[in-house]
Amino acid sequence: MSLDERLREALQRSSSGVDPDLGENLLAIRRKTRRLAIRRRVSLVTFALAVVVGLVLAGPRVIGFVRSFRPAQPASPAPTASLSPSSTQTDPLKGDWRQVATCQDIVRIMTRIGAANRLPALLQAQGNEAQRPPKNDLCKGAPAEFVRILRFKDGHLLIFDPPHQEGGGNLLYTIVDHHTFTLVSAPGDHNIPGVYRFTYRIVGDQLTIVDLNHDVDTEAAFEVAPFVRTG
């Protein structure tokens, strides 16, 4: 046996007594590495789920926090409705209005506006009397009622005065706003010199008119008693 063969044999004998089972060690290492990889994946998945749950729970608060820093936008002004002489909105005065006054009502309004001296002639005309009533008893023999009709239609106001509701005026009216209207005489009518302004108030079927011009005739006619809608 040569020297090389003796040395090779001696090395094989020494290595067989000290070398571990390399195949078993490699298998153990692979198992350990696989377990570590699985644990790492489980940890990553758990962390990702925790992040998602946190975002879901905290999302509304975060959005509210961000919105609190946005500058407030000015509110758009609400559209306003206005009436004008050419407005096509529904005419609240349109229709027939009936006024019923007593002699005492006429005496009261004429006294209030400082025209009591005109009462005898007014009561004679509106009561269709042959003679004027005595000044000390103005309502003696007067009718129980004095009826006046106002007809607002197509921009015209027709007035039918007592005692027989005869045509006493043909005027043009304009709705200014929800409580004001104006009157002017229609062509050929001369009852009103210029533009007269009035306020009105409608409650249910009752109309109240106030003359802002302090004209004796229109105050006496419109303010002696309220009007009631009849058509």
Image (spheres, rainbow, N blue to C red):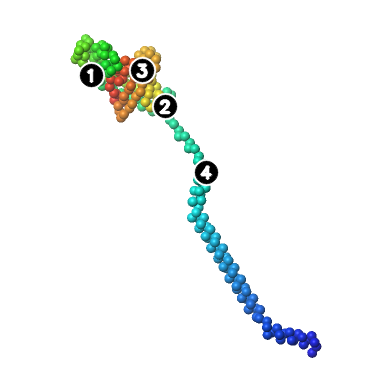
Kind of element beneath mark 2: loop
Instruction: Identify which residue, 191 or 38, lies in the foreground.
Output: 38
Q: Is residue 52 left or right of residue 182?
A: right
Q: Alpha carbon of mark 2 to alpha carbon of mark 4: how far?
A: 39 Å
- The amino acid beneath tag 2 is Leu
Which label's residue is closer to the chain start, 1 or 2?
2
- The amino acid beneath tag 1 is Gln
Which label's residue is closer to the chain start, 4 or 1?
4
The image shows residue 35, relative to residue 127, as above or below, that is below
Quick check: marks 4 and 3 in contact, CB under 8 Å?
A: no
- The amino acid beneath tag 4 is Arg
Q: Which mark is residue 70?
A: 4
Q: Alpha carbon of mark 4 to alpha carbon of mark 3: how far?
A: 56 Å
Q: Which residue is label 3 attached to?
A: 213
Q: Is residue 23 visible?
A: yes
Circle 2 or circle 4, nearest the eye? 4
Quick check: marks 3 and 2 in contact, CB under 8 Å?
A: no
Q: Which mark is residue 76?
A: none
The image shows residue 58, relative to residue 198, as above or below, that is below
Instruction: Identify which residue, 89 or 181, lies in the foreground.
Output: 181
Q: Alpha carbon of mark 1 to alpha carbon of mark 2: how far?
A: 38 Å
Q: Residues within 10 Å of mark 3 (few under 14, many from 20)?
A: few
Kind of element beneath mark 4: loop
Q: Residues within 10 Å of mark 4 (few under 14, many from 20)?
A: few
